[in-house]
Image (cartoon, helix red, strand yellow):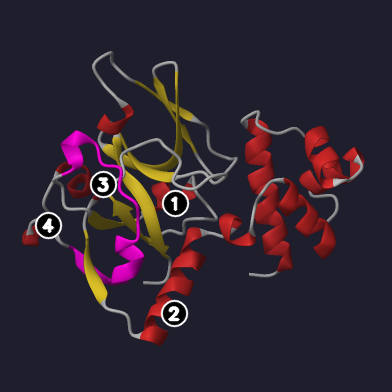
Amino acid sequence: MNFQDLHELLRIELQRRIERGSLTGSRLAQQAGFQQAHISNFLNRKRALSLEGLDRVLASQNLTIDQILPLDLAAAAASHASAQTQEPTDIVPVVSSSVAMDEPRVAEASIIENVQVSGSRLHDNRARPSTGHSHWQRFVAIRADAQQSAAMEPLLAPGAIVVLDRHYNSLAPYRAHQPTLYAVRCGTALLLRYVDFDEGHLILRPYSRDFPVQLIPLASHESPADYIVGRVCLIFSEL
């Protein structure tokens, strides 16, 4: 990743906040101490920020670089650190999307392959299971297909292995000021999206601006946890 890539990730995150109504270009300019035209040119890819300017924008939004980096880079760093310290590893089964959605315990016959993950990287994750999922096997992985990855590019590459924490079925943000990526049941499909809930609808938000927001209406007896399969806790793009 180079300086230009970092600019683009920051620009996408700021545009996401503006689209959700939590930020405006004029407010961003005021908070970061820039002229509005300067910020507008940055958001519209007409100019870049200096290193100092980048720091000012990050600070104004209470963001750090690791919060806007793709999850697979964080996972790669964690994997490298694990190799250096020879941490114990756990085996996570890679399964189909239907198995991830519907099987509380993964049968041996349902395992496509296994992936080794740092034990501390897994078990340091905070759990918020729904009542119906508290007894489910916690960590499973899927290999993202082209349709799943397209809506989340560049965070999610086709063929990436996505580790799901099926004991996190809550819409409570996992980290402050950072959207949580979920695996969500949508009919017979499993979608990877950012998720909000408003007026009886789950709102599925892609990362790519080329894809539409999707709505899932909930019946009166349903809750978001009925559709949230789990939280994406790790992404490995090169396995």
- Foreground disc of the pair 4, 3: 3
Q: Badge 1 is on which residue?
A: 149
Instruction: Assess whether residue 200 is covered by the magenta stretch.
Output: no
Tag 4 and tag 3, C-beta contact below 8 Å: no
Q: Residues within 10 Å of mark 4 (few under 14, many from 20)?
A: some
N-term mark: 1 or 2: 2
Which residues make up the magenta segment? 112-134
- Residue appearing at x 44%, y 72% in the figure: 78
The residue carrying mark 3 is 167
Decide if residue 206 is in sight here: yes
Measured Cα–Cα span from mark 2 to mark 4: 29 Å
Residue 123 shown in magenta: yes
Q: Which mark is residue 110?
A: 4
Q: How far apart are the alpha carbons under marks 1 and 2?
A: 24 Å
Q: Earlier in the sequence, mark 2 or mark 3?
A: 2
- Position above or below: 232 against 202: below
**Residue 130, quarter of the rendered image:** top left
Whole-percent x, y for residue 221 in the image: 23, 16
Give the residue type at disc 4. Answer: Ser
Find disc 2 in the rendering and name its residue. Answer: 80
Query: For the point 44% across and 46% down, which residue is it?
Result: 174
User: How much space separates mark 4 and mark 3, taking CA atoms?
Assistant: 20 Å
Disc 4 to disc 1: CB gap under 8 Å: no
Q: Amino acid at mark 3?
A: His
Which comes before the other along the chain, label 4 or label 3? Answer: 4
Give whichever of 56, 49 is nearer the camera.
Answer: 56
Estimate the x, y position of residue 143 in percent, counting from the top left.
Answer: 32, 58
Q: Is residue 49 visible?
A: no
Determine the residue located farthest toward the top in the rendered image. Answer: 220
For the point 53% across and 38% down, the residue is: 211
* Crowdedness near tag 2: few (<14), some (14–19) or many (≥20) residues, C-alpha within 10 Å: few
Q: Which amino acid type is shown beneath numbered disc 2? A: His
